[in-house]
Structures are given as structure tokens and as C-alpha cells.
Image (cartoon, rainbow, N blue to C red):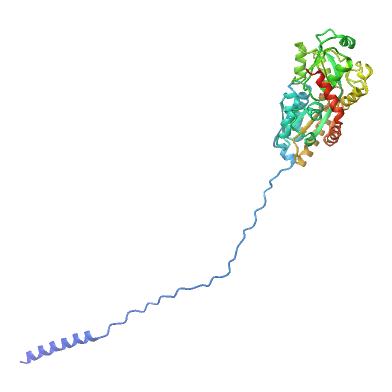
Amino acid sequence: MRRVISVFVALLLSLLAIGAGCARAPAPAPTVTVPAPTVTAPGPTVTVTAPAPTPTPTTVSAAEFFKNNTVTINVAYSAGGGQDYTARLLASFWPDVTGGRMVVFNRATGGGLTNSNYIYTAKPDGLTIGLTAGASALYGAALFKDPGVQFDTLKFTWIGAYYKEPQVLAMAAGLPYQSLAEVQQATGLKLGLISRRGIIAVASALAIELLGLKDARIIPGYGGTTELSLAAGRKEIDGLVYSSTTTKREVGKGYFKPALLVVDNESDVAFPQAPPIAKVVQVSPDNQRILDIVSYLRTVYHFFAPPDMPPDRLEFLRGSFEKIFADAGFVTQMKRVWPEWTGFVKGADLAKEIGLIMKISPEDLAKSEALIDKYVR
């Protein structure tokens, strides 16, 4: 009985323990603190500018420009002539003065006008330069309103010029004429010419007119002195009126006889034996005005460039040309072709001279042009 009571009591205590465990409150969950988000009020906008880079030069000096580039001399005559010789001699001296390079290109078409038109529209950066006789392919052609002119003479950039010489009459070496009197007795003489416009054309026509050459005519269209000389050798032409020194050089080559006449008011040192036409024949007042124009517009060889060249490059070019043309070695070599050396005309002086030339009266020009038209056929 006592044993039964003990088991009962143990069972009762176990039940009480279980009930007490079930009635106990649950243990609190651990507290987790979540930090609230930090809110920062926007401040003023601040723009930070990076330091400006050191500017890189966009231009170079004229001296540096010409040192690093090639200049092209565009000659309005064929290779082998006096202007071609001058251009190539100049190119050989160019590197010593500038450190740069110069080349020569011959554009011997259109009586020189093709070259002048090309130069007028070329880029005015100083690298394109023309060489021609101004009396025929620049102001001469413009004054006489040659239809091939596509430029305004006064807008060209003038670098300089060399040599002034009158026009002379010379006959082909293969012909029998020994004197001016024999020439005046001839019939149907043909005089060669480069361009039908310009002062050489005027001088040619005036020589025919004043000498009274019967049925004489002028044949234009030759590309330069070399072509004229070859034409004389082939007997296409009987003679020519041309600049004195160039004619003397062609005489030395055997193409022509020494000049018989200077188409001018004065004689010339290249042919001292040849009288000026004003002392050979009676000249009327109208023809004297034309002869005065011929005398005033003696052949001068011009270096010119497109309009609107940068001033610093023009100054550099003019100065460099002046240095070369003043060089004793250069002058010595020039005298081989131009023995009666007359020196160099500075660009600024040349520009003033051309400005005066372009003011010759339209009336006198019209008379000169009518004379050309009379004999070019």
C-alpha cells in the first residue's frame, strides 16, 4: 500500500512540473537596433574648372614656313630661254638664302597669258610665283584688252623685276639681207611673235608701218624665243622684233643676224651699230605717240604672285630675292645671258611703276591696237 502511495505521489509531482513549464512566459526575443538612414541636406553646387592648357601656336614665322616648303617658279616660256635660265639659276641659290627648296615649271602656252591666269587664281601662300615679261603677258595684255586676260593686273602681288631692254628688228640667219635698206626693198616678209597683244606686238606692227614693208605680216602664237628661233631655222618666219638681249643671245646661237634696227627713240648697248627707228624715218605725231609707248614699256621681266599674300611672307620673299640678285656670284652667272646687266627692281618700286603704266590713255592704246590688227593676219 505504501508503495502504491509513493508511485502516485511521484506521478503527481511530474504532472505538476510539466504544468508549471507550460505556464511560464516565453523568453523575450533579443532586441535588434536598426540604425535610421542618415539624410544629408544638399549643399550648393560647386563647379571646378580645370586649368587651361598652354596654347599651341597655329602659325609659324615666314622664315620657318619657306624653310619647310617648296616654292615653284612658273615660267611663261619654254625651257632653254633666258627666263628659264634665270629661274633655274635663282632656284640654285634659294636654299643657301632660305634653307628651303625651289623648283621650276615651264607653262609656255597662250603667249604667256595661260601662266598669268594660273598665277592669279593660285593659293596666295607664297609658294606659287610667276615669271614673265610684263609688257606682253601682264599689263600689256590688260591694257590692250586681250580676250585671254582673266586677271586684274593691279591686284597681283609684285615681288620684283629685272632687266629693261628695248625691242630690235633682226632677220633670220639664212636670209640674204645685210642692211636695213635691203629689208625695206623686200616683199611679203613674215615676222614671228609670241602674243598678238602687248608691247612687242605694237613694236612689230610699228616697225612694218614706219619702214613701209610691202605686204609684210605678223605671225603670232609661238611659245617663246626657242620656238621663234626654230621657226626661223625652218624658214617659217623671216625675222622678228624682240627684246634686245634675248635677240643677241639667239644671234649668238646662229638663228638670226645682228639686229638692224632699234624700235625705240634711243639706241641700245646690245647692238650699238643699230640705229633707233626715230632717226631712220620720218615719224608722224600719231605714230610718235605709239613709239613713245613702246619706249616707255620696254621689256621687263617680272616675278609676281597671286593677290592677297600674307604680308610677312611677301616681305620675306622680297628680301630673299633682293639678297640673291645682289649676290656677286649670281650676278656673274646672270651676265652670261644678260651681259648688259641693268640690276634688280624692288617689289614696292615695281608696284608703283605698274600703277602708272595702267594709266596710259585709252585713245593712244586704241591707235596702237588698230596698228596691230592691221598686220596680224
x, y percentage for residue 240? Answer: 82, 16
Which quadrant of the structure image shows residue 274? top right
Q: Is residue 28 above or below residue 139?
A: below
Report the side of 11 relative to 233 (left or right): left
Question: At x 22% / y 84%, what residue is drawn?
Answer: 22
User: In the drawing, does residue 325 fall left or right of residue 13?
Assistant: right
Q: Identify the residue at image location x=45%, y=73%.
A: 37
- Of residues 366 and 84, the one drawn nearer to the viewer in this rendering: 366
Q: Quadrant of the C terminus?
A: top right
Q: Is residue 190 above or below residue 348?
A: above
Q: Is residue 179 left or right of residue 89?
A: right
In the rendered view, tell whether residue 37 sits above or below residue 58.
below
On screen, residue 77 versus residue 3, left or right, reads right
Residue 173 on image: x %, y %: 81, 10
Q: Quadrant of residue 259?
A: top right
Q: Is residue 190 visible?
A: yes
In-front residue for pair 350/290: 290
Camera-nearest residue between 70 and 365: 365
Furthest toward the top, the residue is 176
Q: Nearer the viewer, residue 360 or 87?
A: 360
Q: How many marks?
A: 0
Q: Is residue 209 above or below residue 320?
A: above
Does residue 74 show up?
no
Quarter of the picture holding the N terminus: bottom left
Rendered location of residue 226, percent (x, y): 76, 18
Q: Residue furthest left?
A: 1
Residue 192 place in picture, x, y as percent: 79, 17
Image quadrant in which you'd find residue 114: top right
